[in-house]
Image (cartoon, grey):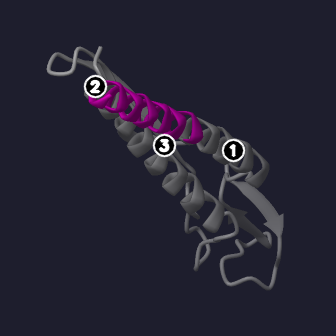
């Protein structure tokens, strides 16, 4: 595998992790978004998926963000009888987003992003040293 292939594979990982972090940020931002009227479903947590395939042009497997799946777990409910979205019993449905889980997922995405960034950095250093050897 050559330097260009390494850079392109790492770039697909960077792109996929960036998209993952964007989805996680959206989940966190909507963690307390209740419906507006009784019976409305609140925001449903989204889960990014990944797909990998062999890229014959670069001779390696690349990763890309797949479709977004929806977390089918139950919404949480809180007793808030004065809320505009409260049902007849006074309960309001809130998103099925757990900010602790989202924070852990964000940290994992950041670490994966950093690992791919390190591949890019090391590859660029190796390329620079190779050019230095060829010059001297």
Q: Taking 20 as reference, is 25 above or below it?
A: below
Q: Which sits earlier in the primary sequence, circle 1 or circle 2?
A: 1
Q: Taking 95 as reference, is 10 above or below it?
A: above
Q: Residue at x 61, y 45 (%)?
A: 110
Residue count near mark 1 (Cα–Cα under 10 Å), binned few <14, some 14–19, many ≥20: few
Compute the Cα span from label 3 to label 2. Answer: 35 Å
Q: Which residues are magenta?
A: 114-136
Is 47 on the left-hand or right-hand side of 102?
A: left
Across the whole image, how many numbered discs are drawn on residues? 3
- Occupied quadrant, residue 15: top left
Question: Which label sits on residue 17?
Answer: 3
Q: Which sits earlier in the primary sequence, circle 3 or circle 2?
A: 3
- Occupied quadrant, residue 13: top left
Determine the secondary structure under disc 3: helix
Q: Is residue 63 visible?
A: no
* Mark 1, residue position: 107
Q: Nearer the viewer, residue 91 or 27?
A: 27
Is 1 on the left-hand or right-hand side of 20?
A: left
Which tag is nearer the camera, tag 1 or tag 2? 2
Q: Taking 90 as reference, is 14 above or below it?
A: above
Residue count near mark 3 (Cα–Cα under 10 Å), binned few <14, some 14–19, many ≥20: many
Which tag is nearer the camera, tag 3 or tag 2? 2
């Amino acid at each position: 595998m050559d330097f260009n292939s390494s850079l392109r594979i790492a770039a697909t990982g960077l792109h996929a992790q960036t998209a993952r972090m964007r989805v996680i940020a959206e989940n966190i931002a909507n963690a307390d978004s209740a419906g507006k009227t009784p019976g409305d479903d609140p925001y449903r947590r989204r889960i990014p998926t990944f797909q990998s395939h062999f890229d014959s042009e670069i001779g390696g497997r690349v990763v890309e963000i797949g479709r977004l799946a929806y977390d089918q777990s139950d919404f949480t409910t809180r007793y808030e009888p004065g809320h505009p979205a409260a049902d007849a019993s006074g309960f309001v449905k809130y998103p099925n987003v757990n900010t602790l889980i989202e924070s852990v997922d964000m940290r994992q995405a950041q670490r994966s992003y950093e690992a791919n960034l390190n591949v890019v950095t090391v590859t660029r250093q190796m390329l620079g040293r190779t050019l230095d050897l060829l010059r001297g």
